[in-house]
Image (cartoon, rainbow, N blue to C red):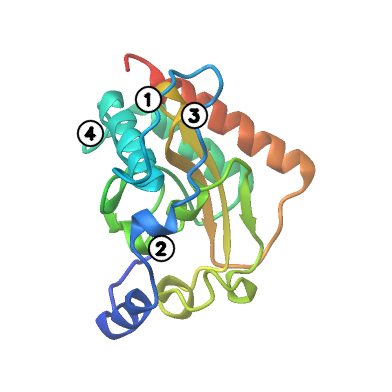
């Protein structure tokens, strides 16, 4: 049965009050890869680096042309493979815009858009490494999240950031489960390989 992402307002409002803005939360957004196009330095007295990084990241996302685009089999076959291979409730390829997470491809009963402040993948795009959380209840970043303490009671999460044009992280390939678990080194490698295939598609035609 697919996950049900019901919005229980009281719990969500309580969680949102504890959060900082998306820009502040991503003050350490990873820089573009060395192969990507460089950006012009901006004086912190004019535009804070974190805001400039976010602007560049959003430009990269827009260049993909994938935000709010319809489902495509080239992404769907990757999420199906991930869900089957890892035996989780859902696998998702999504993109983080200014204020929301857009689910480009997913397995299960999910909304197409989720507020950015509630997106687990918003944490994923803030780091280079694969993010694996064996039990969300024991991680200070997520243990009070509405999707953890309320329906659908998420317990496991694993995500790999996806680079867009110029090397900025624009989204992720992630796994979500309702039972605690970890990933072996082999499984993490397979997840990264699927993410690499997704990344190729993200940059096709951008």
- Identify the mark nearer the N-term, 4 or 2: 2
How far separated are the C-alphas under marks 4 and 3? 27 Å
In the picture, residue 10 is in which quadrant? Answer: bottom left
SS state under label 2: loop
How far separated are the C-alphas under marks 4 and 2? 21 Å
How far separated are the C-alphas under marks 1 and 4? 34 Å
- Identify the mark nearer the N-term, 1 or 3: 3
Q: Which numbered mark, 1 or 2, is in the foreground of this view?
A: 1
Task: Return the mark for residue 70.
Answer: 4
In the picture, residue 160 is in which quadrant? Answer: top right
SS state under label 4: loop
| Mark 4 residue crowding within 10 angstroms, few (<14) / some (14–19) / many (20+) | few
Q: Tally the numbered discs.
A: 4
| Mark 1 residue crowding within 10 angstroms, few (<14) / some (14–19) / many (20+) | few
Q: Nearer the viewer, residue 189 or 12?
A: 12
Q: Which numbered mark, 1 or 4, is in the foreground of this view?
A: 1
- Identify the mark nearer the N-term, 1 or 4: 1
Q: Label 2: which residue?
A: 3
SS state under label 1: loop
Whether residue 195 sits left or right of residue 77 in the image: it is right
How far separated are the C-alphas under marks 1 and 2? 43 Å
Q: Label 1: which residue?
A: 40
């Amino acid at each position: 049965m697919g996950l049900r992402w019901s919005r229980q307002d009281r719990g969500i409002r309580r969680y949102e009050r504890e959060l900082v803005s998306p820009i502040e939360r991503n003050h350490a957004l990873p820089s573009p890869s060395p192969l990507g196009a460089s950006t012009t330095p901006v004086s912190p007295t004019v535009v804070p680096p974190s805001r400039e990084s976010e602007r560049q990241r959003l430009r990269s996302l827009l260049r993909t042309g994938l935000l709010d685009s319809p489902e495509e089999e080239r992404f769907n076959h990757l999420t199906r493979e991930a869900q089957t291979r890892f035996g989780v409730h859902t696998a998702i390829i999504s993109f983080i815009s200014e204020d929301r997470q857009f689910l480009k491809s997913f397995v299960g009963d999910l909304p197409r858009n989720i507020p950015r402040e509630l997106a687990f993948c918003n944490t994923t795009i803030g780091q280079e490494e694969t993010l694996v959380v064996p039990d969300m209840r024991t991680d200070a970043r997520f243990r009070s999240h509405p999707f953890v303490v309320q329906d659908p009671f998420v317990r496991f999460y694993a995500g790999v950031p996806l680079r867009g044009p110029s090397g900025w992280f624009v989204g992720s390939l992630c796994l979500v489960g309702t039972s605690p678990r970890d990933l072996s080194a082999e499984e993490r490698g397979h997840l990264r390989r699927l993410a690499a295939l997704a990344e190729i598609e993200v940059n096709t035609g951008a």
